[in-house]
Amino acid sequence: MTEEEWPILSKSAWIEDDTLIIVDETKLPFKLEYIKGSSYHDAVRAIKEMRTRAAGQLYTVLYAMLLTARKNKNKKPEEILKILKEAADALGNARPTFPLKAISHSIYKYALEAYNGGKDVVEAVEHIVAATIKKHEERIMKIAQNASQLIKDGDTVLTHCNISGILVLIARECRKQGKNVKFIATETRPYLQGARLTAWELKQDGFPVTLITDNAVAYVMWKKMVDLVIVGADRCALNGDIANKIGTYQIAMAAFEHNVPFYVIAWPDPAIPTGKDITIEERDPNEVLYYQNIRLAPEGVNAYYPAFDVTPSKYISGIITPEGIYSPRVIHLYINKISLRRFFDASD
């Protein structure tokens, strides 16, 4: 896949020699800076600090596992596996809501199976990382194609937070089909991913995009400025509930009230029955109280920052997957085709 076919944020981590390179998303769009890591510990730190997120976390975890294997290739296979397990645990627990553990442990388990089968552990990690990335990118392209079918010529799509370039791919599919599409992006407090990343990605690719404050969503829907909503999700339960960046829940309710279709890009997790079973990350209150080291509230004021919320399935019009678009009421049937575990395991 060429750079023209894939937006920059999806290529947000890679390895150069013995160094893990991660795009520092907190500096975009004003600066393109990189985090340089020598071990998986640096990757864990970058993920915890949200200097990489969304698809960036996926690439960071995969390449951190690969770097760990390469750096320990001269050790005994048993030692390599022990270190890989430590890396998988640390990376998997870096943030609780996004399924990092499923990603990191799928790599470790593949390496373990290779060892049990008498194969080279490092070569196994090389293979599974490359295959997982290839499969992931193929599925994302299918998602873009499926999502584009929901959009009519002249539609305006509202989105929240940032889906690591997927909206650009959807818009490109619409362009291929001769359909014009416009976007409304929320700022997405407190890190402003919508303003800094989503709006920037779309503008870079030549698509009309309008930025609004997070609390203007219901108003623009009331003004009939929105035709449909498309957001991503960090977790999807078997009953169709989803967890996404904080603020998604109220957008879904506003869409429901104004008869605006609300679609989610997600994969169901067979281990999560309902939204109540999704772990919600609560981050440092200072991330709300400060922005770029500037305090936004008077001293003595407290803050509360749940990074995600759960949107009940009743507000969701459809869940967009590589295999098609499912009603949240039947998303559990998707498990018959592909589970979250298999999504991150390219060995099949």
Image (tube, rainbow, N blue to C red):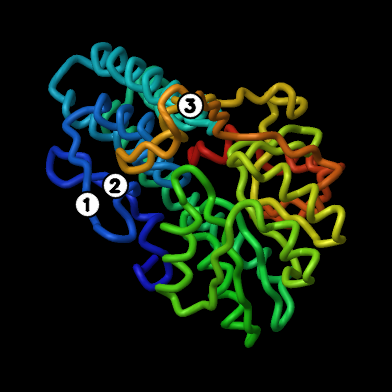
Pointer 2 and pointer 3: residues touching (CB < 8 Å)? no
Q: How many marks?
A: 3
Pointer 1 and pointer 2: residues touching (CB < 8 Å)? yes
Residue 178 locus on image (x, y percent)? 63, 87
Q: Is residue 239 left or right of residue 82?
A: right
Residue 247 locus on image (x, y percent)? 64, 43
Residue 13 locus on image (x, y percent)? 30, 47
Q: In this rendered view, identify the residue nearer to me: 177 or 52.
A: 52
Gap between marks 1 and 2 measured at Cα: 6 Å
Q: In this rendered view, identify the residue nearer to me: 106 or 246.
A: 246
What element does badge 2 sit on? loop
Amino acid type, residue under disc 2 in the picture: Asp
- Quadrant in which the C terminus is drawn: top right
What element does badge 1 sit on? loop
How many other residues sit within 10 Å of disc 1, few (<14), some (14-19) or many (≥20)? some
Q: Which residue is mark 3?
A: 283
Gap between marks 2 and 3 measured at Cα: 19 Å
Q: Which residue is mark 1?
A: 33
Q: Is residue 58 shown above or below 280? A: below
Amino acid type, residue under disc 3 in the picture: Arg
Residue 298 locus on image (x, y percent)? 43, 31
Q: In this rendered view, identify the residue nearer to me: 181 or 18.
A: 181
- First reached walking from the N terminus: tag 2 or tag 3: 2
Mark 1 vs mark 3, foreground winner is 3
Q: Which residue is mark 2?
A: 24
- First reached walking from the N terminus: tag 1 or tag 3: 1
How many other residues sit within 10 Å of disc 2, few (<14), some (14-19) or many (≥20)? many
Q: Quadrant of residue 154?
A: bottom right
Determine the residue positioned at 19% across, 35% down: 37
Q: Is residue 154 shown above or below 36? A: below
